[in-house]
Amino acid sequence: MKPKVAFFSFTSCEGCQLMFLNLEDELLDLLGLVEIVNFREAMKEVLADEYDIAFVEGSITTHSDIEEVEDIRKRTKILIAFGACATIGGINAIKNFQPLDDVRKYVYDRDWDKIDTVPTMSVDQVVDVDCYIHGCPVDKKEILDVVTSVILGKTPRVPDYPVCVECKLAENVCVFDKGLVCLGPVTRAGCSAICPTFGNKCLGCRGIISDPNVNAEKDLLAERGLSIDDILKEFRMFDGLSEVSK
Amino acid sequence: MLPKIIERDDLRAFVEALLADNVVVAPIRKGEKYVFSEVETFDEIALDYNISLLSPKKFFYPQIETVLKFKIGDRPESQAITEASPVIIFGIHPCDIAATWLLDEVFKEDPADPNYLEKRKKAVLIGLNCAQPCDEFSFCRDMGSYNVEEGFDLMLTDLGEKYFVEIGSKLGEEILVEGAHFRDATSGDLKDRQAYQEKKETNFVKRIPYDTKFLPEILEESYDSLVWDAIAKRCFSCGSCNIVCPTCYCFNVTDEVAASAAEGERKRVWDSCQLAEFTEVAGGEVFREERSSRLRHRFFRKGKWLLERYGKLGCVGCGRCDRNCLVKINSVEVYTQLAGEPVQ
Ligand code: SF4
Ligand code: SF4
Ligand code: SF4
Ligand code: SF4
Ligand code: SF4
């Protein structure tokens, strides 16, 4: 029996699900390995309500999100946090630094008080997560690694070292040398340093590594002329839930 | 083999002759920096480059390399992959030639590494001498790699209107013929080369306040030094210092399984001893958990252990580690501090 796979989406742009569907060359092979039973973005039917693997995309931002993700947890063997919104809160956590009522008024205008909201949470702040696929959006290679690892019973590889490693492997000119600042020295690798490779700074979308030298990063940014506020803004873009943003 | 001379204006014709029949890699511009990359024309080559981001070791030992292809399932199979194609490396500087010598020693040691050695065998090294240090980070004089007498097939020294050409191997002699613009060096040319050398000796200054032959002893004495803790406070453990180093040779091995879950490739990827993962073993134990112990490890490798094992320092003083360290951890300063000397 092929493992049953389901996709769920909470507060997000659903770009990560799209990344899955964009695995054009590999999708047929993958569908040979797993049976997709619930995937709103790709199909109408719901074929089962018990799953072997649930991909959960998006942050948890309402009371009903909390109930729903708890329910998914009960119905799946493996729960994968899928994409930055789910793994680290991502962009959605920006709202946590403003009064929630202001946020609701700003977004929903007239009917703001009828719309529920809670501070943004990553999925693992609500339920146990078995596996993380980081990034905004996720990297195709990592989707493949996770799915095949689950099928073969191995542990997927999730790097826990800075983006600089991959940036140097790519022989990039460091963006600090171009007058930009970069969160690469404290951000989790795994994206092949795609942003610096294309001349941009790393925004930290894959989350902070488990042993970051935050003081060194803050000093470095301050040395490049950033104020404390600016430095926090850098971190809060994606990593608002992390200690570094406090 | 007696040295030759090629006139400045003939260098282009020589390189073009090489380009006609060979894959030639040479330093080219990348933004404000330089990288070694395949070139198609002579004009792309930055003859006056100071230092490349990565050293040309990437041509013998690529950052990421497939070493095995495998099938899984009922009838598992595997096949080792060794790919090597001929390449001419044009413009390699003395420190990188010295680093190649060390890598050769490492990779030919039993069990020999066919992936490296096959590629290395097919590579021709055409060196380009340095008249002055790359920048304030170079300490190749201290490490004795600013001049090299061997390890190249040809070595070009820019004497203004002409290049002095030392021939380091049979292969080097053979490729001279491709351009056929070479003449024997005369005693006048030798004198010019001598004058270049005298000037060079004054351009390259020592930066470490003691002879580097004492490094093993100084490091030995410094195992518990507070210097390691002090510099570790600002270290990111970002691994940049290792990845850019021409003498680092550690790699990690990972399996990439195809979407069919029926086949895949085993890859080796350059690794870094500054990462906690580097010493992680099954069960999750990490042997060098402290940043300071990882930093110390790197300096011990460069200044002591490789010397004891291979007879040459594990560092050629190219300065890439220091140049690329965002928090300015600097080898010369570290070696100076360890000896209790004031840092300039
Ligand atoms: S992580 Fe980024 S791409 Fe993925 S759903 Fe969230 S916002 Fe969209
Ligand atoms: S560009 Fe960013 S990721 Fe790359 S080396 Fe520099 S700091 Fe590190
Ligand atoms: S370089 Fe940084 S911002 Fe860009 S994809 Fe990688 S982790 Fe995300
Ligand atoms: S490059 Fe500098 S900050 Fe990064 S690991 Fe090396 S010494 Fe530490
Ligand atoms: S340790 Fe630093 S200076 Fe020495 S060879 Fe490596 S990169 Fe060059």
Image: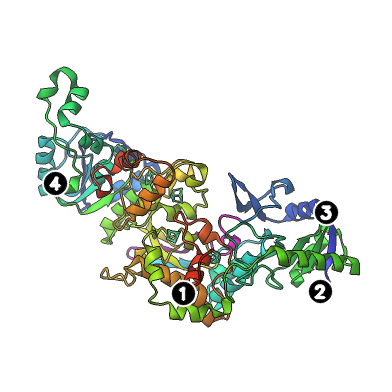
Report the span colored magenta: B52-75
Q: Secondary structure at mark 1?
A: helix
Q: Earlier in the sequence, mark 1 or mark 2?
A: 2
Distance between mark 3 and mark 1 Cα atoms: 43 Å
Badge 3 crowding class, 10 Å Cα cut-off, few under 14, some 14 to 19, many 20 or more, is some
Amino acid residing under circle 4 = Val
Observer-side mark, 4 or 1, equals 1
Q: Secondary structure at mark 3?
A: helix
Specify the quadrant that holds the C terminus of chain A. Answer: top left
**From the viewer's perspective, is B341 left or right of B149?**
left
Q: Is residue A148 above or below residue B73?
A: above
List the residue tagged with mark 3.
B8
Q: Chain of mark 4?
A: A
List the residue tagged with mark 4.
A126
Distance between mark 2 and mark 4 Cα atoms: 74 Å
Q: Is residue B148 magenta?
A: no
**Tag shown at residue B300:** 1
Q: Chain of mark 1?
A: B
Establish whether labels 3 and 4 are both on one chain. Answer: no
Pointer 4 residue Cβ closer than 8 Å to ligand 1 = no
